[in-house]
Amino acid sequence: MNGSMATEAAFIQAQMFFGVMAFVLGVSFGSFFNVCIYRIPVRRSIIRPPSHCYSCGTRIRWHDNIPLVSYLMLRGGCRYCGALFSVRYFLVELLSGIMFLAIFVSYGTGWLTVVNCAFASLLLVGAFIDADHYILPDGLTLGGLVFAVIVAAVSGSHSLIASETMTVWGIVCLDQMSRAGRFVSVPLPVYAPLLWSLAGALFGWVLLQGVGLLGRILFRKEAMGGGDIKLFAFLGAYLGAIHCLFALFVASVLGACIGLVLIIIHKLAGKDEYEEITLVPGRAAPMYWLTSIDRKSESGLGVNQSSIVDQAHLAPDSVTIRVARKTTRQMHHFPFGPYIAVAAYIVMICHDAINELLRNLFVLP
Ligand SMILES: [Zn+2]
């Protein structure tokens, strides 16, 4: 074995080690994201109390709280009472492991991988909260916006926003050059990525306001939520204005395709599903129902006055309401946030390829 082969073997070993590390780190963070997804929307602390069984309340010991492994060992149930936990806990952990690994494969070891993992984490938590509750908490969207602006300010040339800035700057300089007929070199100011990030935030915000306005004019219904608009300001600041346009395009295509498939599946499967719940004064309804009833009555779905039935014989003033579980109308109402999150993740992974495409499109041969 000669020297260069040995170096290559050592390099591959190191890459594999870092790859496994990225996956393990992603899976461990995934465990924390599960906590965030369940607690942030109901305004509970994400630190205290520590993980416990939702059914018997027993605190989950560290050896039963090992991401992925414990779920498989305990067959998705509680060690003490046997209550089953949703398979989604497992899937969120696996998904964030895969996401961190893919970021490492695209960006290697370094600062860019760290900030991209943070970006992906905000998207993942936001997507699941939006799917569950039809909200994107400000902490994630506006918090993400602040994070993106700080990254632009402190990363120098090592950020996605800086690479879009340099791409645009390069195109402008080359254009100047071809007009002047001679080489013109203007160095990029150090504060350029920060300015471009702020411009991107404004662009993302205006873009989604525009799409929302178009939706109101064309379909006469609310197409964009306030959360989606703030999320796009965040994306514009982190990915850059042009990449944020790509994200909107990818999200719309994804939304149209998956929405269509869901509607077809639902039509083939047939019935709309409703569930009846009885609300008794003095007994708290589960938080999930309260928020979901709230959301549905706001959007005019599911609960309406005529479906409230008097149940006086059960308890004084108790009411039974019919809540739509799965209807074709609700399918149309699936939030846009998760599609935006997936699209933004794809655009983040393909950031360099998109820059290359822009250069090829706009730089004259
Ligand atoms: Zn239990």
Image (cartoon, rainbow, N blue to C red):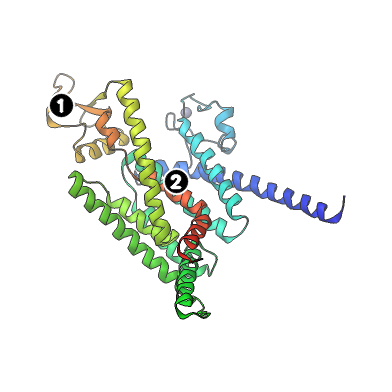
Percent x, y of residue 282? 22, 32
Q: Tell me where residue 325 sits by quadrant.
A: top left
Label 1: how many residues lie within 10 Å, few (<14), some (14-19) or many (20+)? some
Percent x, y of residue 48? 45, 46
Name the one closer to the observer, 80 or 86.
86
Q: Tell me where residue 71 sits by quadrant.
A: top right
- Residue 61 relative to residue 197: left or right: right
Distance Cα–Cα, label 1 vs label 2:
36 Å
Q: Tell me where residue 304 sits by quadrant.
A: top left
Q: Earlier in the sequence, mark 1 or mark 2?
A: 2
Residue at 43% across / 65% down in the picture? 149
Label 2: how many residues lie within 10 Å, few (<14), some (14-19) or many (20+)? many
- Residue 251 relative to residue 87: left or right: left
Q: Secondary structure at mark 2?
A: helix
Percent x, y of residue 235? 40, 56
Residue at 51% across / 28% down in the picture? 76
Name the one closer to the observer, 56 or 29.
29
Disc number for residue 124: 2
In this rendering, is residue 277 above or below 287? above
Residue tagged 1: 307
Residue at 55% across / 42% down in the picture? 98
